[in-house]
Image: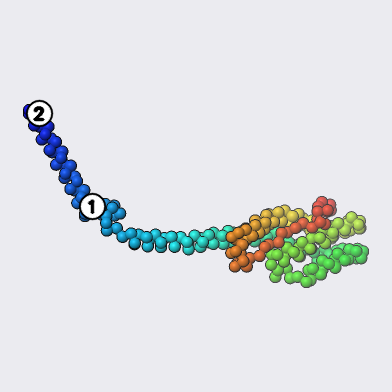
């Protein structure tokens, strides 16, 4: 009997503890503490919540395209910088060739009418263009044309053996030959940079931004058929 009495007393205590826990839970719901989830109360402002969500979504709709534009712009700028740096290396040799040509023309004057046409063409190209005022595309176009005639000058000695005794011509030819080799080496890196740039500005959606920026394609520095045929120069 005594054990039964204590068991009932224990059950009563447990029921009281459960009752107190339920009452406390009800009180927490009525008066939530700062740590209690706000969405569990009747006072949560769903209208304000959705307004904030709309603002966030609207901001993303504006920011994502802007971020994309910045990324594309930076990519274009980097590719342009790479083209300019590559051309700066090749331009050193193009300018050396440009300045050397008048001297070598002077040393081969008078070697047949056919060769005089070549010399006249080169002289005309130099006279009608101010190298220092030209942009990259113009310089490339000019040198593509100039290279055809310059290569022929290097092979005049094949038709005129007496030129082999002309020390001035031989010295200038060696300088020109060395410059041509440097141009050929630098041209590879430049053309790679140009190809990468042209690909970037022609793909969608980059081409839309390019129209606004008015960027133009860059010219490849092509090798002429004359240079392909006369790739080996013997002096």
Is the C-beta separation of discs 2 and 1 under 8 Å?
no
Could one spot residue 165 in this view of the protein? no
Q: Quadrant of residue 143?
A: bottom right
Image position, residue 206 (x, y; %):
59, 60
Compared with residue 166, is residue 20 higher up or lower down, i.e. above or below?
A: above
* Residue at 79% in and 63% down: 145
**Which residue: 66% across, 65% down?**
216
Q: Position of residue 196 (x, y in %)?
A: 65, 56
Name which residue lies at 86% across and 56% down. 155
Element under label 2?
helix
Give 191 or 118, whichever is nearer the viewer: 191
- What residue appears at the point 46 percent right and 60 percent down from the top-left corner? 60
SS under mark 1? helix
Q: Which residue is mark 1?
A: 29
Q: Quadrant of the N terminus?
A: top left
Task: Return the mark for residue 218.
Answer: none
User: Dot 1, how many residues are within 10 Å of its Cα: few (below 14), some (14-19), or many (20+)?
Assistant: some
**Left or right relative to 138: residue 75:** left
Residue 27 visible? The answer is yes
Dot placed on the residue nearer the N-terminal end, 2 or 1: 2
Closest to the observer, 155 or 52: 52
Q: Is residue 229 above or below residue 124?
A: above
Residue 38: which quarter of the image?
bottom left
Residue 20: x and y in percent read 16, 45
Residue, disc 2: 3
């Amino acid at each position: 009997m005594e054990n039964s009495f204590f068991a009932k007393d224990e059950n009563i205590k447990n029921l009281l503890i459960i009752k107190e826990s339920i009452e406390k839970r009800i009180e927490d719901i009525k008066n939530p503490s700062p740590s209690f989830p706000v969405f569990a109360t009747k006072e949560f402002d769903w209208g304000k919540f959705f307004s904030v969500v709309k603002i966030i979504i609207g901001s993303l709709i504006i920011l994502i395209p802007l971020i994309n534009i910045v990324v594309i712009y930076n990519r274009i700028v980097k590719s342009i910088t790479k083209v300019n740096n590559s051309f700066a290396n090749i331009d050193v040799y193009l300018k050396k060739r440009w300045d050397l040509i008048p001297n070598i023309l002077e040393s081969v004057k008078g070697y047949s009418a056919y060769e005089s046409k070549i010399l006249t063409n080169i002289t005309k190209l130099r006279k009608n263009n101010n190298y220092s005022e030209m942009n990259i595309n113009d310089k490339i176009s000019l040198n593509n044309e100039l290279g055809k005639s310059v290569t022929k000058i290097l092979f005049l000695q094949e038709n005129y053996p007496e030129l082999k005794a002309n020390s001035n011509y031989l010295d200038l030819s060696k300088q020109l030959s060395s410059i041509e080799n440097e141009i050929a080496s630098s041209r590879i890196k430049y053309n790679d940079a140009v190809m990468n740039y042209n690909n970037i500005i022609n793909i969608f959606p980059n081409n839309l931004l390019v129209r606004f920026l008015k960027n133009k394609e860059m010219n490849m520095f092509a090798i002429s058929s004359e240079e392909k045929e006369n790739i080996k120069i013997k002096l």
